[in-house]
Every structure is written in C-alpha cells, then in structure tokens.
Amino acid sequence: MTKRRMFLRMITASLLRRRSRMLIALLSIGIGATILAGMVTIYYDVPRQMRAQMRSYGANMLLMPGDGETLDSAKLERVLEQLPGEALVGAAPYRYVRLDMTSRQQSFTTAGTDFEQVLKTSPYFSVEGSYPEAARQVLVGKEIAETIGVKVGSDMELTWQPTAAQGGGDAAADRVPGATLAGSAEGWSGGRVSVTAVLDDEARIAELTIDASTQTEEFGGRTQTEPAFAAQFIGKALPLTLRTAESQGEAGENEVDALTGATVTSTAVVEALNGARKSNAAAQPRTVRYSVTGILVTGGEEEGYVFMSLEDMQALTGEDKLDVAELSVSAEEEQLNAYAEEIGASGEGVTARLVKRVTKSETAVLGKLQALVFLVTVVVLLLTMICVSTTMMAVVSERRREIGLRKALGASDNSIRCEFLGEGIFLGLLGGVLGTILGFVFAQVVSVNVFGSSITFQPLLLPATVIVSMAIAAASCLMPIKRAVGIDPALVLKGE
C-alpha cells in the first residue's frame, strides 16, 4: 500500500469515527460555500439585471444637434449604429412644435415621437386608454386634458403656423429692404400670436398682419380688430420697444404703445416682430383633426404636452427634423462616458449628454448593493471559519491520548499536521462542491423572486468556490493543529 493511499485511509477513517462532529464541520463549510457561491453569483449577475430595472426610471443619455447643426432621422440612425446592440435598450426621437387649437384659443407644445421606442425609454408613463397606433391619433397630457375638457375618444383640431420663428442665428440679418418677415411669440394663456411684416426699401415696416386668434376676443383679439394698433407699427424699424399705459409722453421712433387691457398680447406682438425671420412663402398653415386615444399621467412636465407620431408631425410640418433623442443605454457610468465621447467625435455634428440624476443614482445604488453583498459574504466566511475551528479543537481534545501515543511511538509533528490539515481540506472539498450547487439554486431563487428573471451558471464558479472553501477549512485547522502538536506524550500517557 502506498503512502498516499495510507494517508487517505487514515483521514477517511478518522472522519468516519467522529461522524457527528465532522458532519457539523461539513455543514458549516457547506453553508459558508452556499452563501459564497450565491453571493458571488448575485454580485456579478444582479447588477446587470439591476441596470435593466433602472432603465424604468427613464433615459440616461440625450442626443442633441451641435451648434449650428441639425438632427434628422437618417443622422440619428447613423449615430445609433455606434452603440452596441445589446447595450441599447431604446432610442426615442422627439420633435417639439407649438400647435394652436383655435377653437379653444389655446396653444400647446406638441411632441412628435416614436411610441414604440417611448415604451422602452420611458416605461414609467401611465396612460389612461392606449397609445396611438394609427395616423392622426394623439396622446394628451392630463393637465391639457383637464384644461380643455377632452377625453379618450374625443377629437381635437390642431393648427401648425409656419410663420412661427424657427431656427437660431441673428434675426437682424433678415431685416433687409423688401424682405417678408414672419414670427410668433407666446401670448395670453400660452396661446401663440403670429405676425407677418413686409419691409420697405429702407427696411422699415410697410405692411403688418397680426394673427391673434388664440387670444380672447374681448382683450387680446383687439390687436387685430382695432386698426389703430397695427397702424402705429407702420414706418418703424426693428427692433421695437413696447410702452405700457404708465409711460409718459409720446412714443419714440422705435416705440409702440400697448393696447389698453391687452398688454400681454401686445407684448407678444412686439416679441414676435423682434424675433421674426424671413418667411417661407411656400409653407402654409395646416389644420388637422386628431383623435385622442389616451390621457398621459406622469406627475411631471409631460402632462403639459400633446404627443403624436413622428410621421404625423412630419406630415404636418413638412420637415424631417428632430430636436432631441432620448436613449436608454444599459452600461456603467464609465462606459456611458466613453460612448458619449465616441458619438461626439464621430463627425456627425451630434452631442451626447448623460442624464446625471439617472446615471449617478444607478452607480450609487449598484455600488452600495455590491458593497453589502461583499460585507455579508466576508462575515459568513468568518463565522464558518470560527465554527470549523471550534469543531476541530473539540476533535483534538478527544484525540489527546491517541496523539500522545503516536508521538511516543515516534510520530513526527509534521505527520500530525498533515493528518489534521488533510481532514480539513477534505471537508473543504466536499463542502465546496455541495455549496456551489446549493449556492446557484439560492441565487436563482433570489433572482426570480426579486427581479423576475433567471441567471446563468458561471463555469468558473465551481472551482473558485471549492478553492476558497478548502482555504477556509485549512485556515480553520491552524489553531487546532498548533494545539495538537503541542501535546506532551509523557503527560498524556501518565493520565494528567
């Protein structure tokens, strides 16, 4: 019989003779290995699921056109190709336009978007009714619905005014002789007031048309029904300054008087003129009737918007233009920053910005979760070490006479060390294998019940757990081994 086989037989015989104590040690190591395997699985796999869950809090990246640049659907598609498909959860484009509801003398900010992508980037949206699925259907924010009294199934007519000032730059550059300028500004109750002005050979106002149909007829509507108000603009050069009723003296060269009782609308007329740009003669106002399919409830600013499909928005305005795209990307903050830099350096003229309140919260939550998992694992392993060490100390006490007799017959200290260390490592091997299996089951139950999804088995989990379990068991045997080696055979055999 070889020394190795003899050594294994000694270890197994020693373990079998003290089955109750060794079973306790095995269970301690098994429980520790179970917690270790389960927590390690949770540590590495749950953050991935947590990031997916955090996506329900909204987009964490915004794409916007750079200075002097524009963003359209084709450019957005090219930019999105730079992001890995498995990381991109959703990308919702938005085009914001101010539309009028002349029947209620109201104007609303209307967003054209892709509702399929909105469901991915903003799953927290709550809709009474349903999302639009066909053309000429809209989703109305709760605040607007309560203001104008629309319900699911109601119809509403929205008008697009192409005279609204669009684009950036300096409006003064368009104030050239003979130019036709058009602009709009917000008046009473958010309604838009639109103006069209024709300049003479000296770049002064020669003709002026005011559209205040969204204002009340009694007050704001008088800006277009009382000729004297519009007449005072003729012959004046832009920009203009508005004088209120409290002003003294006659109006100056670039000053106009506000209409008594309609100061807000008068202010809107002046602001619209000062920001007016060259009018697109080919563009004409369009009015379209839409059906309300749902009322949006979010508790946020979205309740003050009307939402329609991007196709409906493009058909209404005749433009393929986007103001922003909201992206939901499953990645850590460092990786998100890398994606943002890559997009900015792509040469497409698009700027990527992170939504800090989402990314910072996500990073903080995941960091605290992983720290908690690590702390719990360390505490459990320490308790396992203490339990195994206590059990092995009891075994040494029981075997004092045996150890003393072996030493009296010539057994070396190293042989005593190897035997106890072998017993501990063998228990660690069995407990590690058992704990790996139970740990994966434990992690699977936690993942399914908490996050609603299963996890995948990591091949490296088995050897890693077994090695750690064997190391913990070996470390637990150090104190008992020291005590066993220190036994004096003369005292033990003498019965002291």
Image: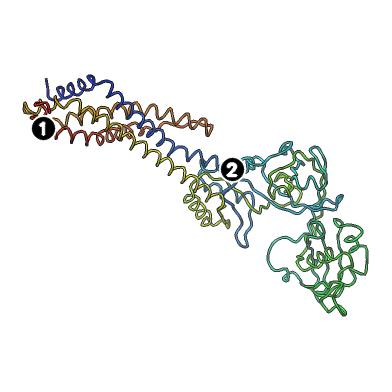
**Residue 339 coordinates in the image, percent (x, y):** 50, 51
Any mark on residue 314, and which? none
**Residue 316 coordinates in the image, percent (x, y):** 76, 49
Any mark on residue 488, and which? 1
Task: Please name whichever residue, 263 or 160, is drawn nearer the observer in this view of the structure.
Answer: 263
Residue 228 appears in the figure: yes
> Position of 491 compared to 430: left or right?
left
Rendered position, 194 above or below 454: below
> Position of 4 compared to 91: left or right?
left
Tell me the kind of residue under disc 1. Answer: Asp
> Position of 435 compared to 483: left or right?
right
Q: Residue at x 61, y 62 (%)?
A: 67
Q: Earlier in the sequence, mark 2 or mark 1?
A: 2
Q: CA distance from mark 2 to mark 1?
A: 74 Å
Task: Please name whichever residue, 250 or 404, is drawn nearer the observer in this view of the structure.
Answer: 404
Rendered position, 480 above or below 280: above
Rendered position, 70 above or below 378: below
Specify few, some or many for label 2: CA neighbours under 10 Å numbering under 14, 14-19, or 20 or more: many
Q: Residue at x 60, y 50 (%)?
A: 76
Q: Nearer the viewer, mark 2 or mark 1?
A: 1
Rendered position, 299 above or below 30: below
* Occupied quadrant, residue 323: bottom right
Task: Please name whichever residue, 212 or 32, is drawn nearer the observer in this view of the structure.
Answer: 32
> Position of 475 compared to 295: left or right?
left
**Residue 2 coordinates in the image, percent (x, y):** 12, 22
Any mark on residue 90, and which? 2
Q: Are marks 2 and 1 in contact (CB under 8 Å)?
A: no
Tell me the kind of residue under disc 2. Answer: Gly
